[in-house]
Amino acid sequence: MNKIIYTFFAVCLLSTSCDDGDLHPEETGGTEGLKVSMEVSFSGLEAWPSAYQIVLAAYGNDSGNPLMSKQIPAPKSEDETVSLDLNGLHEDAKTIGISILAKGRKLIYNFYTYDISNGTDDVTLPVSKIDIASYDRIQHQVFDNYCAACHGAGDKAAAGLYLTEGKSFTNLVNAKSTLSTSKKRVEPGMPSYSFLIDILTGDIVNYNHTDVLPQDELVTLIKTWIRDGAKE
């Protein structure tokens, strides 16, 4: 009798220790359901996230949480093409995304979205290259979440700098800073000559900005965007 009880508790312990609550629903691997394929290369690899996952994902009515997903491995170079399949597509899937997901399956950002709501055949996504360090990603993942509250979302913009969508680009790129006489806010191609980077990495203005962003890799994301030309 004691042997049976010990076995029961051992099985329970093993099953609970393997589930950390952060796993994404993976592809079914079965033969039923459609298959979505991607053959994509990536630029701006220095900004590849480590705190999150980049995935190929299927979404239903809730576009903020995937029905199923598969992690995309980080390529070794920008010349490498990553080929990946999502098999046994969920019957409720309406869109496919190349996305950044946080723990708990929360959608952080969509690099690319493709509508499959009326499809009946297997699909190869019609996208060949994605910029990991895009301005659009910075706007939605960084400025909207951590900066806009003080820079334009309210009644005024601190230091006259608007970081809200539709205004941030012209307020940053090649724009004079009200706090620096020698540097522009963003100097395309030159992170070290961009006052935005100075503010995010050093306590040099009245309000310390060095801890505004929760991960250092978000500063790396902005640096990579600037280095690659600070394109809109």
Image (spheres, grey):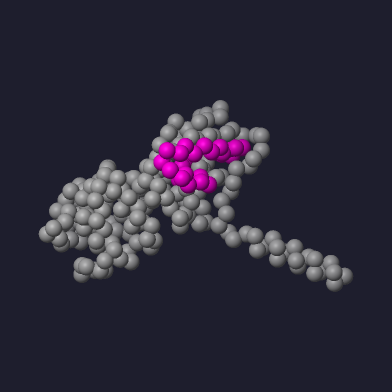
**Residue 120 position in % (x across, y down):** 56, 28
The residue located at (18%, 61%) in the rendering is 159
Residue nearest the viewer, comparing 133 with 46: 46
Q: Is residue 168 visible?
A: no
- Relative placement, left or right, of 220 versus 64 is left
Name of the residue lying farthest toward the bottom: 2
Residue nearest the viewer, comparing 167 with 198: 198
Q: Look at the image and tell me in which quarter the N terminus lies.
A: bottom right
Name of the residue lying farthest toward the right: 1
**Residue 84 position in % (x across, y down):** 53, 38
Q: Look at the image and tell me in which quarter the C terminus lies.
A: top left
- Relative placement, left or right, of 35 versus 110 is right
**Residue 197 position in % (x across, y down):** 26, 58
Q: Quadrant of residue 18?
A: bottom right
The residue located at (50%, 49%) in the rendering is 65
Q: Quadrant of residue 193?
A: bottom left
Above or below, 74 against 84 in this view is: below
